[in-house]
Amino acid sequence: MTEEADVTIEFKGRHDHITERMQAHAAKKLAKLARYSDRLVRIEVVADHAHKNPEVELIAHQRRGAPLVAKERGTSFSATIDLLVDKLDVQLRKQKEKLSGKRAAAAKAPTASSRRAKVAPDEETYEQVVKKALRR
């Protein structure tokens, strides 16, 4: 278990042991994801048969929302980790763009007060028509 910028990395081996060297390599590569530490809490590295044709799965647990999962089978543990870090980086970047896009769209959406302000000066608004009718 390693901690990089408040992101905890947990290693789990199925049917095999993950060596210290493998853990160090994975932690070094996963440090790239530390830029998303405002969102990430914990990353699990689950390796099945870590030494021969490993199937590695990265599970990124976030502060909010469902965990992101990337799974790959490769010829070596280090090559598979490299591929998975890239996959997870793409998922995190896509999610960040999606969230920032929603906020930007909400900020640009016209409100009721801004719609009223766009009425031409020679036209009467609904409120003005109602006030005239009530005065009569």
Image (tube, rainbow, N blue to C red):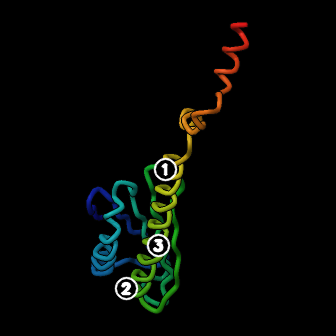
The image shows residue 71 at horizontal and vertical percentages of 53, 76
Point out which mark residue 78 bears: 2
The residue furthest bottom is 75
Q: At 57% from the left edge and 39% from the top edge, which residue is drawn? A: 118
In this rendering, would 134 be left or right of 15? right
Looking at the rendered structure, the kind of residue marked 1 is Arg
Q: Quadrant of residue 135?
A: top right
Point out which mark residue 93 bears: none
Q: Which residue is mark 1?
A: 103
In this rendering, would 49 be left or right of 127? left
Looking at the figure, which quarter contains the N terminus? bottom left
Mark nearer the viewer, 3 or 1? 1
The residue furthest front is 122
Check disc 1 and report its element: helix, strand or loop: helix
Q: Which residue is mark 3?
A: 90
Looking at the rendered structure, the kind of residue marked 3 is Val
Residues under numbered marks 2 and 1 in contact, where contact means CB atoms less than 8 Å apart: no
Mark nearer the viewer, 2 or 3? 3
Q: From this view, report whether residue 28 is shown above or below residue 131.
A: below
Looking at the figure, which quarter contains the C terminus? top right
